[in-house]
């Protein structure tokens, strides 16, 4: 098992269509974890969330986030990120990021469709500033 360097974990997070599993904390202290589409923007992870979903409501109350992305077959690997979210409902700011998300996860032939569908009223643009990253590859070594 080896610890990834920053260029390695950034490449790992950006590869293919791996989803992030995002954990937030409910009012009673219990965790809430859901998968989501994301992209990197410098020191931030960027994704969209419905503002009335459980995740959206929790993030408005408590911006702390923990996200993992993993390779689910041998040699196994993972990246875990902790950070704090900022939220925006500015549709002009949201659209280019939603288009990038659509392209990444649905491909160029359907990316525009999904990007525009997700940059609408009621959706939030979320930026998580990465404060701590733990990343390991080749876990079976």
Image: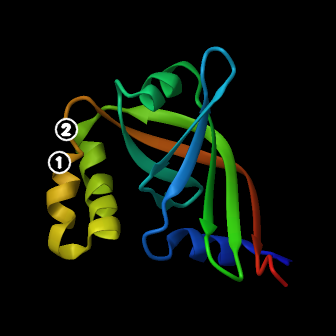
Give the spatial CA distance, label 1 vs label 2. 7 Å
The image shows residue 102 at horizontal and vertical percentages of 27, 61
Residue 26 image point, x, y percent: 60, 22
Mark 2 = which residue?
120
| Percent x, y of residue 74 | 68, 82
Residue under pointer 1? 117
Q: Position of residue 40 (x, y in %)?
A: 50, 61
Which quarter of the rendering shows the C terminus? Answer: bottom right
The residue under the point 70% across, 56% down is: 80
Quarter assignment of residue 25? top right
Q: Which mark is residue 102?
A: none
Q: Residues within 10 Å of mark 2 (few under 14, many from 20)?
A: some
Q: Is residue 7 above or below residue 84?
A: below
Query: Depth check: 81 or 55 in front?
Result: 55
Quarter-of-image position of residue 96: bottom left
User: Taking 116 as reference, is 73 above or below it?
Assistant: below
Q: Secondary structure at mark 2?
A: loop
Assess whether mark 2 and mark 1 are in contact (beta carbons under 8 angstroms): yes
Quadrant into which the N terminus falls: bottom right
Q: How many marks?
A: 2
């Amino acid at each position: 098992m080896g610890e990834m360097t920053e260029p390695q974990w950034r490449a790992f997070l950006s590869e293919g269509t791996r989803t992030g599993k995002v954990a937030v904390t409910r009012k009673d202290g219990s965790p809430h974890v859901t998968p989501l589409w994301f992209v990197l923007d410098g020191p931030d992870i960027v994704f969209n969330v419905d503002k009335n979903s459980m995740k959206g409501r929790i993030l408005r109350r408590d911006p702390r986030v923990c996200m993992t992305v993993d390779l689910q077959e041998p040699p196994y690997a993972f990246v875990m990120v902790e950070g704090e979210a900022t939220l925006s409902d500015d549709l002009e700011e949201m659209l280019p990021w939603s288009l990038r998300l659509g392209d990444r996860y649905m491909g160029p032939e359907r990316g525009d469709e999904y990007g525009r569908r997700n940059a609408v009223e009621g959706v939030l643009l979320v930026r998580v500033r990465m404060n701590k990253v733990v990343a390991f590859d080749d876990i079976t070594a």
